[in-house]
C-alpha cells in the first residue's frame, strides 16, 4: 500500500495503473475509520482492481461553530485499517495541498441542498461537493463509494456527477449499524455510554416509522408525532429535524407515497448525529 500526501504522486500512481486497464475504485473519507468505512472499502475492493482511499478532514464543509478542530484524526490506526482491507493507495493531503490555489471556484448543487441538513448547515454541501469534485479530478476513479447513512450527501454528489458530466459512477452502500441499531459514525466517539443508549432511539424511531407505513398509514404528521414522542422520551435528545421527503427530489411530503426517505438529525451532548431509512410504498 502506498501512502501519499501530494496530488502529483496520486496522479502518477493512478496513471500507471490505468494503462493496465484496471478499474479504479475510490472511497473518500474524513478518517477515523470504522466498520461503516470498511464496508465501503470492501465493496470497492470486490468491484475494482485498484482502490484509492482519501483521508481528509475538509474544512470547507464545517461551519465555524462545528467540530473541525476536535474531529478525531487517528492516522496510524486508519492506515492499518486500509492496509488490512486491501487498499492500494491512501491519499492524505493537508489543507494547503488541496486548497493552495485560493479556491475561488465552488460547486453549488441547487434545490437538493435546501432541505434536511442543508437547512441547518448552510454551506456544508457546497464544501462537500467542491472537495468531491477536486478529489474526483485528482484521482480519476471509475467508481466512487458513498454511504447511505449520509443520504443527502450521496444524492447531491450523484446530481453533481450527472450535471457536470463527470466520467464516473457513484455507488451507494447500505448503512452499517451497531447491534442496538445505532448507525456507526466517527462522531459516536463524543458520546458517553448513557448517551449511546439514548442514541439507539434514533433507529428505533425510524423502525417505528417503517412499521406505521407498512400498516398503511400515509399521513406524515401522524408518523412524525410518533417519532418525536420516541426521541423526546429520555429528555436528552435535541431534535434538529425529522423529515419525510421524496427520495429523489428531497421535497417534504404530507402524504406518504412512492419512494420516500425518512431522515433524522439530532444533537446528543456535543454530538450531532444523522440517520435515515428508505421506504418504497410501491404506490405512485
Ligand atoms: P465520513 O468519513 O464521515 O465523511 O464518511 C465517509 C463515507 O463513509 C461517507 O460516504 C459516509 O456516508 C460513509 N459512512 C459513514 N458512516 C457509515 C455507516 N455507518 N455505514 C455506511 N457508510 C458510512
Image: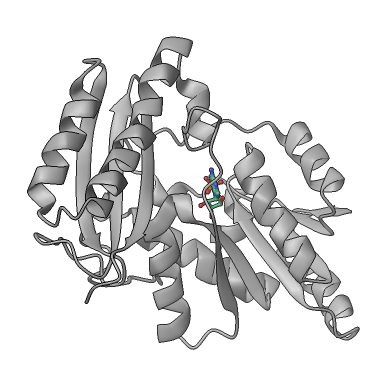
Residue 168 coordinates in the image, percent (x, y): 60, 80
Give whichever of 193, 218 is nearer the camera: 218
Quick check: 67 above or below 45?
Answer: above
State whether residue 278 is above or below residue 209. below
- Give the residue at x 70% y 51%: 92
Quarter where residue 204 is shown: top left
In this orientation, which residue lies closer to the viewer: 100 or 211? 211
**How many numbered marks, from 0 up?**
0
Name the quarter where the C terminus is drawn.
Answer: bottom left
What x and y, as percent, mark residue 194? Answer: 41, 11
User: Can residue 122 be seen at all in this image of the molecule?
Assistant: no
At 16% from the left and 44% from the top, the residue drawn is 223
Residue pictured at 21% horizontal, 32% vertical: 239
**Residue 201 in view (yes/no):** yes
Percent x, y for residue 11? 76, 72
Residue drawn where x is 61% and y is 57% of the image: 28
Amino acid at each position: 500500500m502506498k501512502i501519499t500526501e501530494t496530488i502529483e504522486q496520486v496522479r502518477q500512481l493512478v496513471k500507471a495503473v490505468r494503462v493496465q486497464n484496471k478499474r479504479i475504485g475510490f472511497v473518500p473519507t474524513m478518517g477515523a475509520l470504522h466498520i461503516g468505512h470498511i464496508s465501503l472499502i470492501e465493496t470497492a475492493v470486490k468491484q475494482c482492481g485498484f482502490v484509492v482511499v482519501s483521508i481528509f478532514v475538509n474544512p470547507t464543509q464545517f461551519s465555524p461553530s462545528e467540530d473541525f478542530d476536535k474531529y478525531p484524526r487517528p492516522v496510524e490506526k486508519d492506515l492499518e485499517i486500509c492496509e488490512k482491507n486491501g487498499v492500494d493507495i491512501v491519499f492524505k493531503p493537508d489543507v494547503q495541498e488541496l486548497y493552495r490555489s485560493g479556491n475561488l471556484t465552488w460547486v453549488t448543487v441547487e434545490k437538493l441542498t435546501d432541505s434536511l441538513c442543508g437547512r441547518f448547515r448552510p454551506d456544508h454541501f457546497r464544501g462537500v461537493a467542491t472537495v468531491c469534485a477536486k478529489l474526483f479530478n485528482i484521482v480519476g476513479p471509475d467508481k466512487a463509494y458513498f454511504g447511505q447513512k449520509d443520504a443527502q450527501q450521496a444524492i447531491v454528489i450523484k446530481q453533481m456527477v450527472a450535471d457536470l458530466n463527470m466520467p464516473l459512477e457513484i455507488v451507494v452502500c447500505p448503512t452499517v449499524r451497531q447491534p442496538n441499531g445505532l448507525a456507526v459514525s466517527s462522531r459516536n466517539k463524543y458520546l458517553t455510554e448513557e448517551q449511546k443508549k439514548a442514541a439507539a432511539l434514533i433507529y428505533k424511531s425510524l423502525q417505528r416509522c417503517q412499521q406505521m407505513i407498512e400498516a398503511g398509514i400515509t399521513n406524515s404528521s401522524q408518523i412524525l408525532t410518533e417519532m418525536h414522542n420516541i426521541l423526546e422520551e429520555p429528555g436528552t435528545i435535541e431534535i434538529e429535524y425529522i423529515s419525510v421527503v421524496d427520495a429523489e427530489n428531497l421535497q417534504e411530503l404530507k402524504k406518504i407515497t412512492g419512494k420516500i426517505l425518512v431522515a433524522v438529525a439530532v444533537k446528543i451532548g456535543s454530538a450531532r448525529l444523522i440517520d435515515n431509512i428508505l421506504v418504497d410504498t410501491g404506490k405512485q
